[in-house]
Image (tube, rainbow, N blue to C red):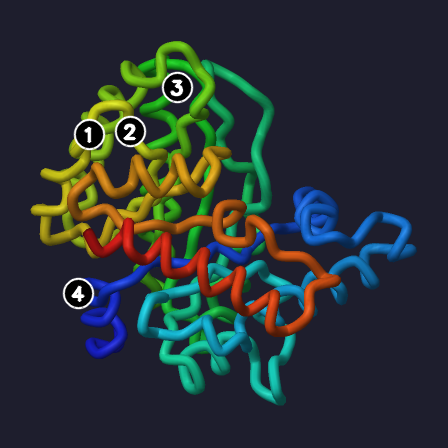
Amino acid sequence: MMNDKRLNRMRTGKGFIAALDQSGGSTPKALKAYGIDESAYKNDEEMFYLVHEMRTRIITSPEFTSDNILGAILFEQTMARYIDGRYTGDYLWDVKGILPFLKIDQGLADLNMGVQLMKEMPLLDTLLARAVERNIFGTKMRSVIKEANKEGIRAVVDQQFEIAKRVYEAGLIPIVEPEIDINIPDKQEAEAILKDELVRALGEYSDILVMFKLTLPNEENLYEDLLKNEQVVRIVALSGGYSREVANHKLASNRGLIASFSRALVEGLNANQSEEEFNEMLGHSIDDIAKASNK
């Protein structure tokens, strides 16, 4: 069953969640931004080795501490790899005091009804069992909303909560992530529909705990009242393509929301930086994001 100490840490702790879960499709882009070109690796095995080195450098940095970081979201392969002789999840919690999460979705289906649902997950139960064995605290799964289509948004929320129930019953805390594309013209309307659907789903799945990972809304504090629902452990915000400066500004304007940034967190980090330069840049990013999360 859920560890009360870890659950209380996530409910009440200061800081934010670091999203370190780039998977196969997004890894080349993440490595390139980090200064490692595709010519540096010959196959997926070498690519994933290099991205694990990048994540290890971030996680083991003296700047990456529980003072400002509540949790870290991992890719499936990262969960199975080691840092200093420990599984990554164990290193995060036992050494750093940071809660490990696992990205469980297998990517996005084709666009339909203005949304991209998650692809089928036939091996989900096996993956959840492995996550429990690896002392993972929670999971994360992403869908994408491309227009204010009520039918499509309802389908996204229904699918997310169906999986969330299975995650919770396996002993993990699910992060429901129905991302709204920041570039769509009817973003604010889509956000209003999504909020209504989340409220509906909470009522229908009243026996589970969830977290939400949501796009920073156009209307400030739109999701604040969701935090009053006892089922909602925490609401985190994704950077969604905003620069760190813009994302932090928007985050600071939304009471109760904390960050779960990926690109905004690693912005400016480079494989060729010295340890001093790397740690200074990472520390600056972490301080800025934590400040916006702890307003």
Q: Identify the image quadrant of residue 192.
A: top left
Give the spatial CA distance, label 1 vs label 2: 6 Å
Residue at 63% of width from left, 80% of height from top? Answer: 82
**Mark nearer the N terminus (4 vs 1):** 4
Amino acid at circle 3:
Gly
Give the spatial CA distance, label 1 vs label 3: 24 Å
**Mark nearer the N terminus (1 vs 3):** 3
**Percent x, y of residue 70:** 33, 66
Q: Nearer the viewer, residue 292 or 165?
A: 292
Q: Nearer the viewer, mark 4 or mark 3?
A: 4
Residue holding disc 2: 217
| SS at mark 2 in the image | loop
**Mark nearer the N terminus (4 vs 2):** 4
Outermost residue on the bottom side: it is: 85
Give the spatial CA distance, label 4 vs label 3: 33 Å
Residue holding disc 4: 12
Give the spatial CA distance, label 3 vs label 2: 19 Å
Residue holding disc 3: 152
Q: Nearer the viewer, residue 107 or 33?
A: 33
